[in-house]
Amino acid sequence: MNTHAIELTTRDGSQFRFNCADDQNLLAAAADAHIVLPAQCGYGNCGTCYADVTQGDYTLGKYNPTALNAEAKEKGGTLLCCTFPHSDLHISLPFDHDRVLIGEIKIRSAEIIAIKTVGENTLRLELCLAPDENGGNGAEFEPGQFMELEVPGHDIKRAYSLSNTGNWEGKLEFLIRLQPRGLFSTWLKEQATVGQMLLVHGPKGSFGLYESGLKPRWFVAGGTGLAPMLSMLRRMAEFQEPHPARLYFGVNRAEELFCQAELNALQTELPQLQVIYCVWKPEDNWDGFCGTPVDALTQDLMSTTVMPDIYLCGPPKLIDAAETTARAHGVPDNQILSERFLPAS
Amino acid sequence: MFCYQCEQTDRSNIESGCATAKGMCGKDATTSDLQDLLIHAIEGIAQYTKRARALNVQDNAADEFILYGMFTTLTNVNFNATRFSTLIQDAAKIRDRVKTSYITAALAAGQAPEELTGSAVWQPASDLDGLLKQAADVGINAGLENVGPDIIGLRSLVLYGLKGVCAYAHHAYALGKESPTVYAGIEDALDFLSTAPTDVDALLNQSMALGTLNLEVMALLDEANTGSFGAQQPTQVLITPTLGKAILVSGHDLGDLAALLEQTKDSGINIYTHGEMLPAHAYPKLKAYPHLVGNYGGAWQDQQKEFAEFPGAILMTSNCIIEPLPQYRQRIFTAGPVGWPGVRHIGDKNFAPLIQAANALPGFKTEVSPKTITIGFGRDAVMGVADKVIDAVKSGAIKHFFLVGGCDGAASGRNYYTDFAEQAPQDTVIMTLGCAKYRFNQHDFGDIGGIPRLLDLGQCNDSYSAIKIATALAGAFECGVNELPLSLIISWFEQKAAAVLLTLLALGIRNIRLGPTLPAFLTPNLVQVLVDKFGLLPNTTAQADIEASLSRKAA
């Protein structure tokens, strides 16, 4: 067995180094060195640990092709959780160093304080963290991050993006699409009650605002992909950030829309925010945009002179289509940030 | 970007200076370029406020904006590009307002308004790409190929000294003290810089004028501090934690600290000072708050480790922030000119979110045996025992005074100051100020006939105290400051120190040792001028420099 020197370089030029044996995946080796990289599923299914290998040889284990498309893979794109080195590697990470945690992911208990249906097949789940081992009550996370929710006693752990912002009351808010035969969905529908306790792992993930960017911010959300966008927009409102902002929020049918009241409230606090509701298969009485959010994005990109930072969240097909249209209209790769919602397998 | 305003600037290339995507301080190229552009815009305001002032028209809001705007561009103050893009647009609007007032006043006085050019007529681009294109023409290095490095270096000396003057003036302003002559002096310097000056003598004269102006500003600040909180008194300060919820306050703004102390009165939260906030414990009206319990940590460059370990909320006032790590990014708050993208800013002294964070955080849960240090030897405390000090000098018990102080920093060469203080002979007294003191302020220096051998004068902002003490000693011994058995060992890092250096030079004080390295913007020719005119000395080794000081081998 050989050990290889791995060098990671973040988007903002910071470097992390650790060693990795050739039978160990990079994500696990980094964690052994107390370098916790944004990741979720750990077996090549979700795409959260995407990175680019710029130098060296490696094997990519079994992975989900919707988490890493062939074009990206061809150019050195990889998923760290299923990458095994054959040589020393230089790897470029698509996020800044402040998303690399030195230490361990926190696991805390949280009480369910509300479960509310907000749209067809969509729930808002609100939790309140119990004090941590030091008696701390804060919910400390960056907008755009997610938590993994674990139901004690059941073999259920699922990742959901947070839709609120960091706070000192321990509040966590999630928007959850009920999947027809999903384990967590079924538990949520049939067994979850206010007062029950969950375990939350996190915060995790590198998706979030490009804080030092000054470009207009366009957010493209499919369904509950709205959650991290709400979090980021709420942060912008709290900080009164002046960036021009647009939200393209897409659903299949108008009945599936949700959080309009929250978005209206946000527009009061963030007057420059434009919200474009996109309904793919509308009824005759729908007077908003007809089509997908990618259709609306494409239309607006044709007439814009300043290329915006584009934030994408939703199903992989939506993200692939949005990335394709953004690139076709000249948006540089480093201005496209995405979070893919993939079904758990 | 091109920036070489601080001591830690990149010196790995033949031409010193930070010129890549990110400076040594963590400032990214966009922010750096926007800071250059903001200074350009502020010069435009000053071109008009100066002329309006000559016609007895003042615009205090514009004056305050100049101080604040300049302060945001000092090292380790504001890293938020968004903030700068807003400030640049604000600057252009303020400039236009002052311009209108000036033209109106000139016409009313029967004068033809001057047709100004450069910054006075510049208009900011509406988007980032446009602003960055504009910034390319206005950085400190602009015109280098035509005027050469000496002129650029002298302009830098003026600009960076001026930034320090503005920062100190803003500190005084924050406590309600301002002065039209100070504003006029600042506007003169900005107006001068807007002409892209090339005359060496004019640039040197402007530097000295700023040194003199800064003395006035330091006096104003001294008045603001002592007027608001009383004169510093020798005080024992706890440097170990106390059980309970906690807030750590760093930076220099005593007004922010006072407001927080008032808002946390009887809340059960303990307030700790960090870095340059340490002298707060010596002011009667601040130490009257029992929950101002102690000092935590050391100088600014250690904050990432110390803040990560601090079990409470953190407030960074005025300056000296470095990148907040993820471990404490949610629980650090900025105030005043400070900023970091993605970190919550409190602009109105309503510290409720900070207090809420402190209540939600664990605080200190383990008791440790208490340790203290003594601080609070501002000019009143030292002058109060002047007779004793003078007698000790006359009797030979005190052979020499050293002022070892200024900024601290991460560079390993700064151990020089620890060595210097600790190796100074037992019959010498060390006065200190600024955060450089953390390198030796826990060392037991003992006393000379009851006079502590280490006298902590306060913040870098308290340099005025040092000057007053030196002047008083010179008066008592009927000699000039340069004839006193006193050596100044100054550690610099950023632009406030540049302003203080100009003040010392303007006062004619010679033989100052400046380190740990000389400013990168001083070319060999300029260093030679300072050596010839002022006997400025670079550091060698602590022992050699102590010996040279004691035997007065200095130039």
Image (cartoon, coloured by chain):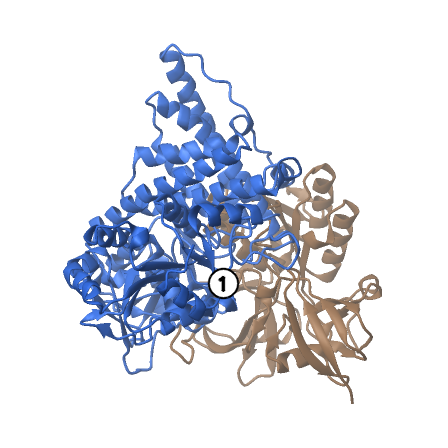
Total marks drawn?
1
Q: In the rendered image, which quarter contains the C terminus of chain B?
A: bottom left
> Looking at the image, is B487 positioned above or below residue B542?
above
Q: Is residue B384 left or right of residue B466?
A: left
Please determine whether, in this image, residue A289 is positioned above or below residue B244: above
Q: Relative to the observer, which residue lies in front, A112 or A284? A: A112
Q: Percent from the top left, x then y, of residue B34?
A: 56, 43
In this view, the residue in front, A302 or B484, is B484
- Where's residue A32, x and y in %? 63, 82
**Viewer can see residue A345:** yes
Specify the amino acid type for callout 1: Pro
Q: Is residue A272 above or below residue A313?
A: above
Q: Is residue B194 left or right of residue A93?
A: left
Q: Classify A56 as above or below B113.
A: below
Residue A7 drawn at (x, y percent): 70, 72
Q: Check disc 1: other Cα within 10 Å, few if <14, some if 14-19, many if 20+.
A: many
Q: Chain of mark 1?
A: B
The residue lying at 40 percent from left, 43 percent from top is: B166
Name the residue tied to disc 1: B324
Q: Which chain is brown?
A: A
**Mark 1 residue element:** loop
Place of residue B296 in the rendered image (x, y in percent of width and height, measured from the top left): 35, 70
Residue at the far bottom: name it. Answer: A1
Most foreground residue, A118 or B396? B396
The picture quadrant where one finds residue B185 is top left
Chain coloured blue: B
Q: Nearer the viewer, residue B182 or B238?
A: B182
Residue B13 lies in quadrant:
bottom right
Evaluate whether residue B61 shows in this view: no
* Residue B492 in the figure: left or right of residue A216: left
* A42 horizontally vs A325: left or right: left
